[in-house]
Amino acid sequence: MRTIGKNRGLARLADADGHFRMVALDQRPPLFEAIAQAKNITRDQVQYSDVTAAKRLLVEALAPYCSSMLFDPNFAVPAAIDVLPARCGLIMTLEEHRVEETQGGRRSKAIANWSVEKIRAMGGDAVKVLAWYRPDADASVNEHQRRFVREIGQECARYDVPYVLELLVYPFLGSANHTPDYVESPGKLPELVIESVREFAKPEYAVDLLKLESPLAAASLPPRDGSAAARAAQKEFDAIGDICREQGIPWVLLSGGAAREKFERVLDFAYAAGAGGFLAGRTIWLEAVRRHFPDRNAVAASLRQDGVAVLEGLNALTKANANAWTARFPAFSDIKQEGDFARAY
């Protein structure tokens, strides 16, 4: 049973119907790259002021159409915390986007001078952590990743704040398709995704909401039309749904920059398996930045027209088909007189 704080935090992330319609704005390298392409410069030439300007535009345009937003502390908060609507939930990312890359896999770490305690102190409704994970990575790497996730879960429990865990499979250093950023592999092995979920759904990690990639590449998913291919694909999503249902953990899908129609297809399969929504970023806003920055008026116009259209399409699909999350508060059968609750909590 989740605590009062965790239940109320998750409720802040969802809409009134219990659906998670969330926009990710914590991306750092993908946004750096989009701005660099737009300005025809290299990524290391992107200015801090460019990044904060872009993030402010995203919040202003998209916040009215989602249930919550995912911010990072170093760019998004200084850029736009003042324009985030009070009714919009605030998820704060904790992980550093720069990881330690080794031959045996990736090791994650927290942003310097940032913590669960600070996220709770600033009024964050949830803590989000991205953990790169492959079950077939080096044993010492996986032990580091499991410890990293577990210790943050303990801190989230200490401060009674929901823990949102994002899991991503990645290519090994030196492989043909290696990239430090997340690019969905067309040859993705669903068992790597499913077994990662199986590991981190265990109670020892204290995860409250899972942000997951599709177990199959979005570009190659068939229509959910009852065909043999569709039934085979559904089994992979159902495997994730079964794990999350057994552990009582709601789950949502990340977009990974997939085209709108491809991501909607991912959601079709995921919602049939019990997913409760999405936490999407690039699919909604990338083109507006990449095509129009630094013309802020043009970026804003593109977001209002095309970005909002994508988001509202995802919202409609989610409201129609996603699994609704419901808060389940502890029973207070032992509370008999004044002072019992305050003493026991």
Image: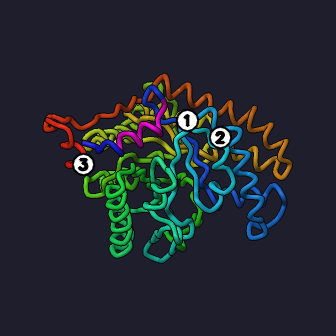
In the rendered image, is residue 219 in sight?
no
Label of residue 284 in the image = 2
| Residue occupying image coordinates x 14% and y 34% | 333
| Residue occupying image coordinates x 23% and y 38% | 330
Q: Position of residue 120 (x, y in %)?
A: 45, 55
Q: Residues at badges 3 and 1 in contact (C-beta under 8 Å)?
A: no
Q: Amino acid at mark 1?
A: Arg
Question: What is the span of residues highlighted in magenta in the rendered image?
Answer: 6-15
Label of residue 87 in the image = 1
In terms of depth relative to the viewer, which is nearer, 240 or 161? Answer: 161
Q: Position of residue 250 (x, y in %)?
A: 37, 40
Q: Amino acid at mark 3?
A: Tyr
Q: Is residue 106 above or below residue 170?
A: below
Q: Position of residue 174 (x, y in %)?
A: 54, 74
Q: Residue beneath label 3, please?
A: 345
Q: Is residue 336 on the magenta stretch?
A: no
User: Which label sits in the foreground, 3 or 1?
Assistant: 3
Mark 1, secondary structure of its residue: loop
| Residue occupying image coordinates x 79% and y 58% | 37
Mark 2, secondary structure of its residue: helix
Q: Earlier in the sequence, mark 3 or mark 2?
A: 2
